[in-house]
Image (cartoon, rainbow, N blue to C red):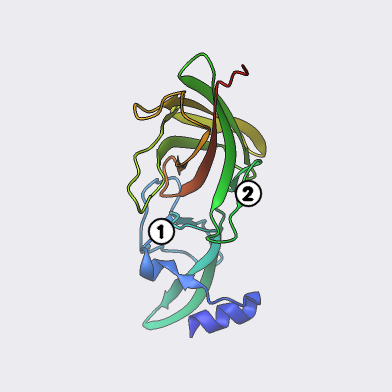
Amino acid sequence: MDEDILNNALGETKQLCNTEVTDNCWHLLLPPSKNFEKTLSLPLNPGEQTEVGVVVKSPQISRSQKFYSVLELTLQEGKADDSIKVFSVANIVTPKLECTKQLVCLENGLSVIPLVAKFEDSQQDRVKIPFRNNGAKELEMVLTVVPYPNSNKEQPKLNVACTPSTCKIAPNSMGLVNLTVGLADNITNSKANERQQMVLVIKIKNSLLLYYFVLDFSLIFNCKLY
């Protein structure tokens, strides 16, 4: 089997996937043409050589992984055909985004970011969340905050928006996500301090990658001593 031969040659412990079979994502490119082809026929004289590009369009994956395809070369000389197989291996690395304030919940494995929203003389607060791009490429992110799934269908206490709703972080750099936090209509500053959980959804542009972070807000209202 091709997979067994390749795994043994690379010393891989996990079975690699032939993504030409699953995703049809490998192509041939003959310069100077910019057309992607699946098959090419090249007339060559003895001693002559040419360059052929092998192009892979990354399939939609949720984690870093290696995959391969098989390029079959057939030499037609007279009436006899002779063919060899060439393995092409690609290593696709997914972006690595983390919040420097995040904690990991042991119960469900979710990333939780503890935050404090203070409401003193106004009904709004602004919160900044630091993120780090540990990858080698710039990340362009689309940001959304949604209510945390609640089994008792309790109404959200907060209205939270990302301002702005998009953000870019350079490779191996830090960036800030800005939140505007407002009180919902069912909450007034006369109530005791409360907590509220929301979910920050980060979509990486031009991909299907999504990151989820639970925002664990502590709500602090204006307190006066008499």
| Among numbered discs 1 and 2, the one appearing first in the sequence | 1
Give the residue type at disc 1. His
Observer able to see residue 166: yes
**Residue 41 percent location from the top left of the image:** 37, 64
**Residue 55 percent location from the top left of the image:** 46, 55
Judge by depth and name the residue closer to the eye, 44 or 172.
Answer: 172
Judge by depth and name the residue closer to the eye, 195 or 124.
Answer: 195
In this rendering, is residue 123 above or below 193? Answer: above
Judge by depth and name the residue closer to the eye, 31 or 66.
Answer: 66
Secondary structure found at label 2: strand
> Which dot marks residue 59?
none
- The residue singled out by tag 1 in the image is 27
Residue 120 vs residue 75: left or right?
right
Give the residue type at disc 2. Leu
> What residue lies at 49% left-to-right and 47% top-to-bottom?
211
**Residue 8 percent location from the top left of the image:** 62, 81
> What residue lies at 65% left-to-right and 34% top-to-bottom?
174
Q: To which quarter of the image does residue 109 belong?
A: bottom right
Secondary structure found at label 1: strand
In this rendering, is residue 16 above or below 206? Answer: below
What's the CA distance linking mark 1 and mark 2? 43 Å
> What residue lies at 41% left-to-right and 62% top-to-bottom?
42
- The residue singled out by tag 2 in the image is 103
Observer able to see residue 95: no
For label 2, count other residues whose C-alpha is less than 10 Å away and answer few (under 14), some (14-19) or many (20+): some
Q: Are marks 1 and 2 in contact (CB under 8 Å)?
A: no
In the image as oriented, which residue stretches furthest toward the top?
121
**Residue 142 percent location from the top left of the image:** 43, 35
